[in-house]
Image (tube, rainbow, N blue to C red):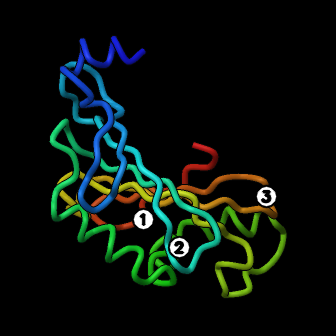
Amino acid sequence: MSKLQRLWFGGSAAEKHHEFFGKILFMGGVKPRADDYWENEQYVIELQKPITVLITAGLDGPDAAQITFYKQCTADLDQLFQKCWPIFEPDFQMWTKKKFSGKWQDDFELISLEIPLNGDADNPWSVCYFVEATNHYFSACFENNIAAYNLIDG
């Protein structure tokens, strides 16, 4: 596989070290596409496990605005969840048959954060949580910085 990566990407462009994110892996093809992204794992102090970070960017990798976006999202995990809750609430109540406690950590485990192109929250992005009580993943998909829909197990 590494021979193919060198042929397609000219060296080790499929994996590189980023000054902020550390080791990042490129998940795109030979020709640039709008859905190319980098993948990474990050430890957030308040969480027990690392989260997957998906960064929508071309071969150049994440930019300064994307670092800022990541820092803003992870600086206040309660606020991040509050942005997701309006679209999670109906599915949560339907699947669990219980009322939400008000403390997201009781029922939701943050799994991943997708950082939008250029760190611009008006571009599509998402946040994914695992909900143990339902044994499903809830992904808040954002459009124009508003949680537009919940993608379950998507």
Mark toward the start of the polypeptide (3 vs 1): 3
- For label 2, the SS is helix
> In this image, 25 relative to 84: left or right?
left
Q: Mark 2 highlights which residue? A: 86
> In this image, 62 relative to 70: left or right?
left
Residue 38 to residue 126: above or below = above
Q: Which of the two residues, 72 or 23, is positioned nearer the viewer here?
A: 23
Residue 49 to residue 154: above or below = below
- For label 3, the SS is loop
If the image is split into quadrants, where does the C terminus sit?
Answer: top right
Q: Mark 3 highlights which residue? A: 134
For the point 52% across and 75% down, the residue is 81
For the point 65% across and 67% down, the residue is 109
- Residue 147 has which mark? 1
What amino acid is labelled 2 in the image? Pro
For the point 72% across and 52% down, the residue is 136
Distance from disc 3 to disc 1, alpha carbons, whole Å, reads 21 Å
